Structures are given as structure tokens and as C-alpha cells.
Image (spheres, helix red, strand yellow):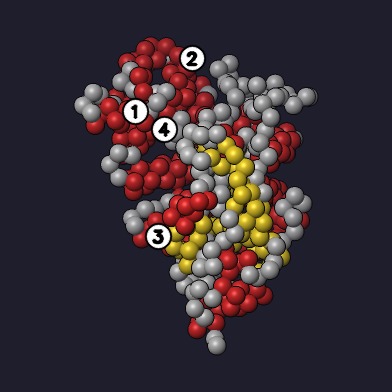
Amino acid sequence: MTLLELKPNQADGIAHAIRHACAPLPDPAHMIEFGVFFDPYIDSSKVVLLGEASHGTAEFYQARAAITRNLIENHGFNIIAVEADWPDAERIDRHVRHRNVRSYDAESFIRFPDWMWRNAEFEQFVSWLRSYNESLAPDRRVEFRGLDIYSLNSSLKAVLDYLQRIDPEEAIKARRRYACLTPWQERPAGYAHAILSGVQEECEPAVVAQLRELLARELDYAAADGEDFLDAAQNARIVATAEHYYRAMYRSGNDSWNLRDKHMFETLQKLLEYRPDAKAVVWAHNSHIGNAAATAMGWDGQFNIGELARIAYGEETLLVGFGTDRGTVAAADDWDQPVNVKAVNPSRPDSYERVFRQTAIPRSLTDLRGTRDRAVREVLSERRLERAIGVVYRPESEFYSHYFEAVLPEQFDCYVWFEETKAVNLLAAVRPQGVPETYPFGL
């Protein structure tokens, strides 16, 4: 039987056929040793997108931290952009780049799902990045940015605070424009329902007008402090996008998904354009960083950051997927519910995860591009199921809730595999002894 005659449900046969191409990896806790395994894949990459199969898995954070450290130290990467809200990431950025902390800065990542970033694995990386940046000139330091759109409340406040400091008269006008959204800024999902009910008029004209007004004053404002203007302009964009997003949620799942990923990709583009010689590493879920065109998402009309990056940057883009078979994960039963440590079911026999489990290699890196072994790419190119666990995990309905069809070699350039993983370690709500006042996770 040749490789191409294997059936997609024969996980054992496929595993045997690809095992030689699955390079064993060290423990990601050994950051330097783990990171260098990815050197042959970097080449001329300008954007490296690092995924995760679940939002609450320790090994995925450790692996991304190790790869990112290598990208920074040895390949000139200077931007980290993550699936997180801009204002939260801005506080991390001020901490790691030793920038002044603003008087209104609060803790980072206190909104659901806080454990995505308030965990020990991520905190350790933040600590390393702050230390690494300390010896560099301010304009050479690695920045940390958020790509997401869920910060309507804090972004709106950030725009008003910025204008109050730099142009109080414009702040008065901005408050009038944002007054339309003010009743909903703490509960934005209710905004769309109010529109559908006829209780509320759309606020789009007002928030778009505010964004345009702010951008029109860029020369004057940025001259005072370019970093602060960048922050204010991005928050104004988030307000405008979030207003659109919450209206789209009630119309079509595809519309809201595409709007969100389009915003995240455009934010990434702006960061790359803003900084000379920019190279960015992106941390987000597999569903955002893999090529959506190779998944059921894309076949249903959705696109994502990975697909847009591939179109925009071509061979300068590297898409790295992650997977696991079993273990534990930090996740909630439903949106806005408490986090729990849950057991992850072993993978289904008809999934890609089962194929890699059957290789019997605990940790591995597999080249899916076909540049080294075309047959491996071809044998993996039959559609199979793939698992995605987000901030919600429902093991009792896992097939319907968390599996989708994909073509793995078209979705990712390479694949990082962990046979068994464990949940992230949640941070205690206490400031560790000896950390600086700028520490972004303390109470």
C-alpha cells in the first residue's frame, strides 16, 4: 500500500507513514533548547503566527514563549501582538518597555476570560521580556500589543482621557459624540439588542466622526507624544469597530467573526508600518492563525488573520499550529462563568490529533510544507477532524462543540505536538514580593 492509498480514518497507518518526519522536541521549559528547533523554518519570515489548540494550556504558552524568545534574540523580531485587548496589552507594554505608567492605569486582564493572560506561564515571559528590554535603547525595545476588540469601555475612556490631557476642548466634543454609546459601554451586547428593539439609534456616525477627527489632528497630537497618540488612535478605532461588531453579532456569525479578524489583521499591519524594520510574532488561537481557507470555517465563508497574512505577506509568513491529545485545561462551562480545571478527552479516532498520538512521540515538530518530504504533506492532506478548545470547554458534547474539518498541511506550515498537556497555573491575586510598582498583574 502506498502512502496515498491510506484511508483518512486509518490513524495508525498515517502515523506510521509520517513518524520519521516528526522531529522530537525537548521540554519547552528549556526555552533556549526548544526555541532553536524552529530556526530552519524562519528563513525570511516577517510575520510568525503561533497558535494554540486551547486557550488554557500551559505547554502552549511555554512553547510560544520559547519560540518568541529565540525570534527576538536571534532573528530581529521586535513586536509581539496577541489575541488580547489593546488597553490591557498597553499596560504590559509600558511595563516591559520601562515606559511611564499613566495615573489611570489599572490592572491588566481582569475581565473574563482573565486566565488567558493572568497565568504564571505568561507572567514568566513578561518578566523575561522586561529584563531583556532593560539594556536596550528605548527605540530598540520589543513592544507588546493587543489585537482584539472587546475593550469598548476601557478604549472609550482611554480616548477621552487622552484628549482631556492634550486638548480639553476636543475632549468636550468627544464626550458628546460618545454619549450615544455611554449607556452601553459596560454591557455592549445590550446595545445591539436595544437597536433591534427600536429603543436605541445606531451610534456608528458619531464614533466614526470621532475617529476621523482624531486622525485629522495626528500631526499636532503626535508631535507631543507619538506613542500616546498611537494608543489613542487605536482605542478610537476599537470603539468604532466594537460598535459595528456588536451590531453584527445579531445579524450573522460570519459577519461578526470576519469583522473581528479583519480588525486584528489591520491592527497588525499598522504596527508593522509604524516601526522601521518591523518583524512581528503573533500569539492567537489556531482558529485565528491557521489559514481559514483550509478549514470548515473558510468553506462556510469565514476568513482569519492567518489567511489575510498569507495573502498580504506571502512567503514572509509562517503559520505554526499546535495540538494535544489529552490532559487538563483551564476553561469555563459557559461565557462569563468561573474558570475550572477540566480533563481533556482523548482525541477521536478520525482526528488529526489521533494521528499524531499514534506516532508515540510525546513532543514533536512536523514540517507540513512538503519542502523536505512531499509524501508526508500528501498523506496528511485528506480532510480530517481537528479539535479547538476556546475559553469554554464542554467535554460532554465535544464532537459538536469543539471539532471541525480541516486540511492540516494547507492550514499550517508546521505543527507542534504535545501528547499530554496540563492547565495553565492561575495567578494569585496578590502582588509578588519585590516586583516594581509598574507590575501589571498586582492588586
Q: Which numbered disc covers residue 296?
A: 3
Label disc, if present, on residue 190 of the rendered structure: 1
Q: Neighbour class for label 1 at 10 Å: few (<14), some, many (≥20)?
A: some
Q: Earlier in the sequence, mark 1 or mark 3?
A: 1
How far apart marks 1 and 2 lie (CA) works out to 31 Å
Residue 286: image location, x then y, percent: 52, 53
Residue at 78 percent of width and 24 percent of height: 434
Callout 2: helix, strand or loop? helix
User: Given contact means CB atoms under 8 Å apart, are the residues at marks 1 and 3 in contact?
Assistant: no
Judge depth for marks 1 and 2 and give the one in front: 1
Q: Which label's residue is closer to the chain start, 3 or 2? A: 2
Q: Position of residue 168 (x, y in %)?
A: 42, 11
Lower position in the chain sequence, tag 3 or tag 4: 4
Place of residue 259 in the rendered image (x, y in percent of width and height, measured from the top left): 36, 43
Q: How many numbered marks are there?
A: 4
| Mark 4 and mark 2: Cα distance apart in space | 20 Å
Would you say 154 lies left or right of 100 here? left
Mark 4: few/some/many CA within 10 Å (<14, 14-19, 20+): many
Which image quarter holds the N terminus? bottom right
Residue 201 is drawn in which quadrant? top left
Q: CA distance from mark 1 to mark 4?
A: 18 Å
**Farthest-out residue, front:** 396
Residue type of the residue flagged with mark 4? Ile
Residue underneath mark 2: 165
**Which structural element holds mark 1?**
helix
Indicate whether 254 appears above or below 408.
above
